Image: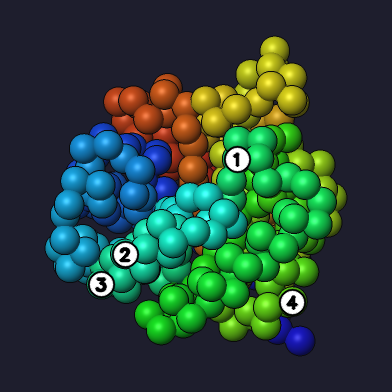
Amino acid sequence: MSATRSAPVFAINHMVTPALRPQAFFELARAIGVRDVEIRNDLTGNAIIDGTPAADIGAQAAAAGVKIATINALQRFNEWTPEREKEAIELADYARDAGAAALVLVPVNDGTGQEDGARQANLRAALTALKPILTARGLFGFVEPLGFEICSLRSKREAVEAIEAVGGEDTFRIVHDTFHHHLAGEPALFPQWTGLVHISGVTDAAVSLSDMRDSHRVLVDGQDRLGNTAQIRALLAGGYAGVFSFEPFAEEVQQHDDPAGALSQSIALIKSQLA
C-alpha cells in the first residue's frame, strides 16, 4: 500500500489573474513557491486565444521553472460532433507542443443533454473518440463534472463508470472541484480516480446553495462555506497525489492588486487548518 501524503501540493490556474501575460503568470507561480500551472484557452486577448504559438508558451514555462499541468479546457466535450473532433485535435496538438500533461474536459452546461440513458451514451461516445486523440499525443484527459443543476454531467461516479466502460483507465481521470462537489451534493470521493483538484471558496453568507455561481468563487479563507479543508484532507487521506489548483472566478480576486500576497495567505491558511 502506498503511503498517503499529508501536505497538499498547490498549483494555480490562469483564471486567478487572467489579465497577466503567460510569462508574468508563470513568474507569479514561482514567486509564491508553486511549480505547477494551468493555462486556459478562454481568456480573451491572452494566450492561447490570441494565437501565441504553443512552443513559445512551453519555452516561457520552462524558463520560469514551472510545469504546465493542464490546458483548460475542451468545452462541451460530451456533445461529440465533427466540429468538436476538430477542436479536440487542435487543442490536443497545442497541449502536446506546449508541454502540458493533460487536457481538461468540460461537459455541456446549458440544460441540454441531461436525459437519462442518452446522457451516459453521449459521454461514452465522446470518451471513446477522445481516447486515441489523447493517447497519440501522450496526454491525459481530465473529465470535470460540474455541480450546476443544468449540467449534463454532475456525477463523478457516472464519469468513473463511463471511463471504465470504454477501457479508458490509462487515459482518463476526473477533476474534483471543491465548488462543484459541494453543489452536486454527491458525497462519494474518488481519490484514486482523481487527476486534478480545483479549489475555490464561497464566503458570501447571503447566497443560497442553488444560486452559487462562478462569480461567487474566491480564494479559500476563514469564512469558506464549501468545506475546502475537509475535502482536501479526505482526498489526501484517500491517496490522492496530484495538485490542488486555485481556480477562483470572482472579479475581486482577478483584479487584486497583490495576487501573490493573497494566494500566499490562502495557502498558509489551508496548511494551518490541515495541521
Query: Mark 3, mark 2: which one is toward the viewer?
Result: 2
Find disc 2 in the rendering and name its residue. 90
Callout 1: helix, strand or loop?
loop
**Are discs 2 and 4 less than 8 Å apart at CB?**
no
CA separation, marks 3 and 4?
Answer: 30 Å
Query: Mark 1, mark 3: which one is toward the viewer?
Result: 1
**Are discs 3 and 4 less than 8 Å apart at CB?**
no
Is residue 80 visible in the rendered structure shown here? yes
N-terminal of the pair, mark 1 or mark 4, is 1
Which quadrant, please, contains the N terminus? Answer: bottom right
Find disc 1 in the rendering and name its residue. 109
Few, some or many residues within 10 Å of mark 3 (<14, 14–19, 20+): some
CA separation, marks 2 and 4?
Answer: 26 Å
Query: Mark 3, mark 4: which one is toward the viewer?
Result: 4
Left or right: residue 140 versus residue 233 is left
Horizontal and vertical percent position of residue 241: 60, 70
**Are discs 1 and 4 less than 8 Å apart at CB?**
no
Callout 1, which amino acid? Asn
Callout 4: helix, strand or loop?
helix
264 w.r.t. 258: above or below: below
N-terminal of the pair, mark 1 or mark 3, is 3
CA separation, marks 1 and 4?
Answer: 23 Å
N-terminal of the pair, mark 1 or mark 2, is 2
CA separation, marks 3 and 2?
Answer: 11 Å
Find disc 3 in the rendering and name its residue. 97
N-terminal of the pair, mark 3 or mark 4, is 3
**Point 49% across, 43% down: residue:** 247
Callout 4, which amino acid? Ala
Q: Which mark is residue 165?
A: 4
